[in-house]
Amino acid sequence: MSKRAEFGRWPKDIPLQRFSPEKWSRQRPTHGDADPGLIAAALRWSQQRPSGNWYTFAASRGVGRDRPFGTTICGVELVAWRDEQNILHVGPGACPHLGAPLTEAQVDDAALICRWHGMRVEATGSARWCPYPSYDDGVLAWVRLDAIGKQPPTDTPIIGARPADTTVHAVTRLTGVCEPRDIIANRLDPWHGSWLHPYSFAHLEVAQAPPRRDITEENHRFLLTVTFRVTRRLGVPVEAEFTCPDPRTIVMRIVSGEGAGSVVETHATPMGPGPDGRPRTAVIEAVIANSERPGFRYARRALPVLRPLMTRAATRLWRDDMAYAERRYQLRTHQL
């Protein structure tokens, strides 16, 4: 039986479609399309985007009421927690008394009680401890650091288009030895997808890319067709776009095909230097799923099972992509 006849009987109205897999080494090479000058131009344009001085630092559900959450952004130590009304609070991570780590404090509604001497640090702030503007979008937790960002501040983060219902989502976080622009540069090279991630992508074709000069809001996107692999011969074909809403974020949005409207937000948050003096960047990636199919409502009920699977898939991709970003940083800074 011919492949055409075999595939012809496969229903066209279901998400999974059969495709003929290519041997990895037999794929069409993409190095001629992945123009370094074009990638560099797209990166330069992205770095000029406004940020409003907002940085994402955790999944929304990763900051709770039971204990403080601690992190650093550009070397600034932060502590975050929620009060009994579930409102997010973020401020300096050091107690204003003798500098004790407030990540070890006890949460008492809208205050932290330091474990060193019992000092009560209120979320409203004081002359010695001033909270930072924070924002919870239901998927990610954000903080605004005007002294670090040094751009005109905005009231809320600059977030790209998302599905109206963000219930079905998962967030993964990895840390790499690189800078945020190395993470963004990785995503501005869609041509590496089926070469570096053959277990996830097949038949990837870039249909539209920005120009090398005069990039604007209207022409900066990448548009591609790709099949997301489920098994060796079954996948979900879609059309997707890549856009940069701010200098540390790149968003992949499915524009047609199964899951249209679903997004993958890749945020690169600078943490500051590590023990070796080299920069550390946190990749915080949110996958927000959407579908018009009636059965999608069952995905909400299956979230306890789906979230670990979504997180595992994103983590696997980013283990490979982090090596790409770290290698780029090493070459760029001559640290090989």
Image (cartoon, rainbow, N blue to C red):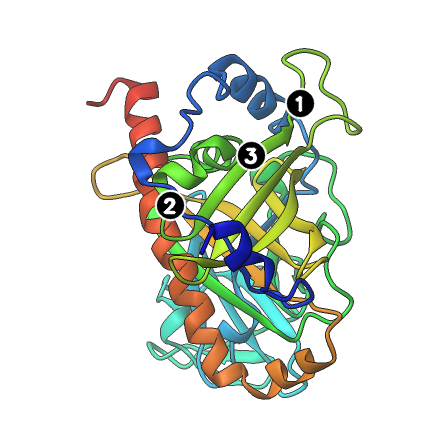
Residue 85 lies, in percent from the top left, at 68, 85
> Nearer the viewer's eye, disc 3 or disc 2?
3
Task: Name the residue beneath numbered marker 2.
Answer: 197
Q: Is residue 300 above or below residue 166?
A: below
Q: Quadrant of the C terminus?
A: top left
Q: CA distance from mark 2 to mark 1?
A: 23 Å
Residue 210 - label: 1
Q: For the residue marked with disc 2, what is the amino acid? A: His
Q: Earlier in the sequence, mark 3 or mark 1?
A: 3
Q: How many marks?
A: 3
Quadrant where the N terminus sits is: bottom left
Look at 48% across and 31% down and name the residue there: 191
Q: CA distance from mark 3 to mark 2?
A: 14 Å
Q: Position of residue 284 (x, y in %)?
A: 48, 55
- Above or below, 235 against 28 in this view is below
Along the line of sight, the residue nearer the viewer: 313 or 85: 313
Residue in view at x 61 percent, y 67 percent: 139
Task: Give the class, few, some or many, for how many residues have Cα within 10 Å of label 1's Cα (few <14, many ≥20).
Answer: some
Left or right of residue 141: residue 292? right
What's the distance in space between the residues labelled 3 and 1, CA to CA?
15 Å
